[in-house]
Image (spheres, grey):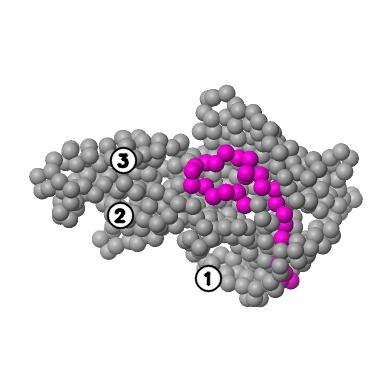
């Protein structure tokens, strides 16, 4: 008996800029009309951004009867084509040590694959968007990370609290260097673009590398970016597809390996949505346009191929035998293996299943749910999906995520994994 158990299942390599970049479905339709911005070197881009920042209005309450400077954005978070949560940004004005500041609050709720993660921040920004101080908090069923940071001289003093499960929180202090004028957060970016000229140009914003103080979610995460955020204002573009297509004003964002396209209302530069190109597969769209949020329950029959994939992925990564068993249609898989000459014709089904499950459990890293869903999300985002005439859905994962080929089929109304090729 010769077994070809998928030892490389869900292997992950660090994504680099030359790696797979799955563009959003509407990206070709939204190609800019006005052409690319004039290329600018790093120093020139920083200087040009400094001029825009110097012209921002003072963040103070308006005179009676005049409109305020506050604004907000409510959006849906979309991952691998499905609604997985919400994004909220609120920009207001206030004071800190008797100085006017921009007060920015942000919240991202992410429910991908069954993991519920909430990331919240409160940021105090000076008139020119320089970060004065802030708090950042991320919670999930597996862990909680809380940061408090304040500018002091040439950097920030960061207080960090990390809780893993029910364990006693680990408290620590970190000194984080940062360039002059460093800022942070999506609210700062929206403020900058709100007051930036409409004409094509290239800017750069120095950012606080706050992620460097956050414990890595898994061993495959790339090092946090430290270079400035490069903003290439392109200008006129189209956002959306079909009847939902609308005029937009677009900017391309890039920081190291990360890149995205940000779309705004042409006249006001109010945010419409963001398409992430690297890492791929994630979008932020206007509230209500993300579609119905799917519900995945690993203990229930899979109602889609993606539900079967996630059930199997959770079973493998978390080492939960019952999910592995329930995700696979063993009779079909055994028949396929026998036909391919990989297993003997007289193989007992129970022995076949036992061998596969034992191998999956042996290779599992017993990851926490949040970490597993992060890897599964990226596997889906970088994979190629094909539906065959017989209803079988084939998912080809990229080499960075194992390079495996998964075959799914609905049998008696339930979706199963029926074959795995390396």
Q: Residues within 10 Å of mark 3 (few under 14, many from 20)?
A: many
The vertical placement of 20 against 325, above or below, is below
Marking on residue 360: 3
Q: Is residue 383 left or right of residue 160?
A: left
Upstream in sequence: badge 1 or badge 2: 1
Query: Mark 3 falls on what kind of element?
Result: helix
The verdict on residue 222 being magenta is yes
Which residue shows up at 34% across the image and 43% down it? 312
Marking on residue 221: none
Q: CA distance from mark 3 to mark 1?
A: 40 Å
Nearest the viewer among 370 and 173 is: 173
Q: Is residue 218 left or right of residue 125?
A: left
Residue 98 image point, x, y percent: 89, 40
Q: CA distance from mark 1 to mark 2?
A: 32 Å
Q: Residues within 10 Å of mark 1 (few under 14, many from 20)?
A: few
Q: Residue 253's quadrant in the figure?
A: bottom right
Looking at the rendering, the stretch of residues picked out in magenta corresponds to: 199-225
Farthest residue toward the bottom? 34
Query: Mark 1 falls on what kind of element?
Result: loop
Which residue shows up at 79% across the image and 40% down it? 152
Residue named by callout 2: 422
Upstream in sequence: badge 3 or badge 2: 3
Query: Mark 2 falls on what kind of element?
Result: loop
Q: Residues within 10 Å of mark 2 (few under 14, many from 20)?
A: some
């Amino acid at each position: 008996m010769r077994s070809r158990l998928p030892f490389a299942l869900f292997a992950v390599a660090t994504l680099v800029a030359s790696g797979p970049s799955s563009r959003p479905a509407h990206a070709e339709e939204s190609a800019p009309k006005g052409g690319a911005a004039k290329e600018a070197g790093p120093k020139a881009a920083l200087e040009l951004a400094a001029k825009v920042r110097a012209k921002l209005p003072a963040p103070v309450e308006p005179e009676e009867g005049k409109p305020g400077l506050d604004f907000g954005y409510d959006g849906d978070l979309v991952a691998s084509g499905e609604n997985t949560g919400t994004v909220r940004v609120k920009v207001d004005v206030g004071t800190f040590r008797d100085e006017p500041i921009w007060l920015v609050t942000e919240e991202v709720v992410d429910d991908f694959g069954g993991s519920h993660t909430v990331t919240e921040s409160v940021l105090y920004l000076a008139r020119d968007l320089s970060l004065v101080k802030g708090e950042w908090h991320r919670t999930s069923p597996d862990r909680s990370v809380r940061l408090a940071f304040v500018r002091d001289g040439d950097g920030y003093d960061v207080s960090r609290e990390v809780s893993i499960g029910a364990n006693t929180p680990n408290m620590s202090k970190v000194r984080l260097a940062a360039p002059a004028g460093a800022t942070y957060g999506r609210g700062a970016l929206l403020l900058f673009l709100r007051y930036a000229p409409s004409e094509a140009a290239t800017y750069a914003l120095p950012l606080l590398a706050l992620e460097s103080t956050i414990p890595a979610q898994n061993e495959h995460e790339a090092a946090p970016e430290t270079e400035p955020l490069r903003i290439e204002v392109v200008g006129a573009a189209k956002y959306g597809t079909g009847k939902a297509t609308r005029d937009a004003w677009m900017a391309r964002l890039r920081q190291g390996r990360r890149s995205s396209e940000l779309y705004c209302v042409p006249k006001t530069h109010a945010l419409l949505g963001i398409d992430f190109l690297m890492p791929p597969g994630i979008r932020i769209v206007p509230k209500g346009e993300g579609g119905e949020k799917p519900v995945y329950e690993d203990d229930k029959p899979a109602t889609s191929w993606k539900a079967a994939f996630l059930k199997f992925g959770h079973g493998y990564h978390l080492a939960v035998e019952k999910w592995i068993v329930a995700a696979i249609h063993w009779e079909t898989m055994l028949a396929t293996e026998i036909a391919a000459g990989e297993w003997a014709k007289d193989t007992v089904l129970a022995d076949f299943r036992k061998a596969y499950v034992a191998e999956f459990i042996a290779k599992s890293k017993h990851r926490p749910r949040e970490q597993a869903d992060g890897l599964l999300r990226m596997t889906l985002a970088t994979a190629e999906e094909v539906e065959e005439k017989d209803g079988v859905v084939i998912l080809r994962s990229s080499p960075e995520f194992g390079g495996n080929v998964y075959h799914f089929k609905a049998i008696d109304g339930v979706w199963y994994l029926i074959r795995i090729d390396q």
